[in-house]
Image: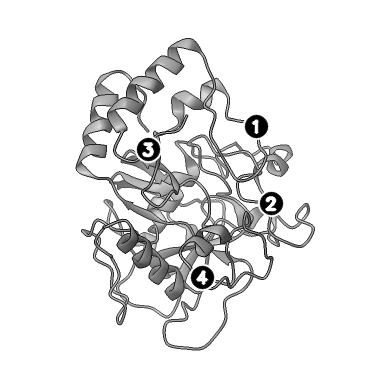
Amino acid sequence: MKIRYGQVFTALGVILCLSACGQKDALPQPGKQAAPNANSLQKSPVEITSKSGVKMRLIPGGEFLMGSSSGDKDETPPHRVTVSGFAMDVFEVTQDQYAAFEWPNPAHFKDPRRPVEQVRWSDAALFCNERSRREGLEPCYDEVTFECRFDASGYRLPTEAEWEYAARAGTETDYDFGNDPRERQSHANFKKISNGRTGLAGKKKPNRWGLYDMCGNVYEWCHDVYDPAYYAASPGTDPHGPATGEKRVLRGGAWNSSPVACRAPTRYSDVPGITDACFARDTYGFRSVRPLSPEEKTGLLVSDKMGKPSP
């Protein structure tokens, strides 16, 4: 199902029709992976294509249990968090996206369909700004201080809460597909099966909300400054992370990670590269988010009233 940007109301009618007919959601993707089944169609948020040709999912806002009591100490305490709706890239930012924007490709594992890696946090933020400008949206990041305007209409890196909410896709298990280790190879590109490199974007199965590579392939930069004790004091609604700190958060694990590092609540961090000349690792990439437009918000409300499930 292909939906162009701004055609949310038309898309809602198509989704209801497909659901009633029991058809599958034929989600396009760079890699070769079978489309989600009919059950995942009912659970997947609406898909759109942005003005710059990037596929995104419109994630309705909601509440979820963030963190874990069975992982590392910085995942505790588990706490209820409410997030506002947002649009998120279906895939990690790929090398062909960089090429389309005429940005230098920093990736170690060159292939247009593989995710961009060796990306510093600051470079990811600047790319979000460039993408915003290309689509006529207001950039979020100050390009000197890197402070973020969350009320701007443009793209930015997801907060930790947004990322984990999207990765969990309505579940409370370590992975959205459950805790069965036999399912990992179908959903994640991690150390045991990666052959020492990134995989093609979208080759593995998506999560329940139609997002690919949320576990494994490359770590994904989040907006938040990292603080191992932040969860004990974080706001319950739309937390953005601490105001200051030396490191930024990465989520999701990478091609050289253990299964534990690919869990939805696992936290990782590194220096953002704003003021130094360090190079990021070939395990660091990202995906972008932006706020929902007024039309998208209205469309999601209409969807809820028409009986479509919302997370």
* Label disc, if present, on residue 4 of the rendered structure: 3
Which mark sits nearer the N-terminus, 1 or 3?
A: 3
Horizontal side of 1 relative to 112 (left or right) equals: left
Q: Earlier in the sequence, mark 2 or mark 3?
A: 3
Percent x, y of residue 197: 73, 61
The secondary element bearing badge 1 is classed as loop
- Mark 4 Cα-neighbour bin, 10 Å: few <14, some 14–19, many ≥20: some
Q: Which residue is mark 1?
A: 34
Marked residue nearer the N-terminal end (4 or 1): 1
User: Which label lies toward us, 4 or 1?
Assistant: 1
Q: As displayed, is residue 284 above or below residue 29? A: below
Mark nearer the viewer, 4 or 2: 2
Q: Secondary structure at mark 2?
A: loop
In the picture of the structure, the residue carrying the numbered disc 4 is 269
Image position, residue 54 (x, y; %): 45, 49
Nearest the eye: 38 or 162: 38
Of the residues shown, which amino acid type is indicated by label 4?
Ser
Q: Amino acid at mark 2?
A: Asn
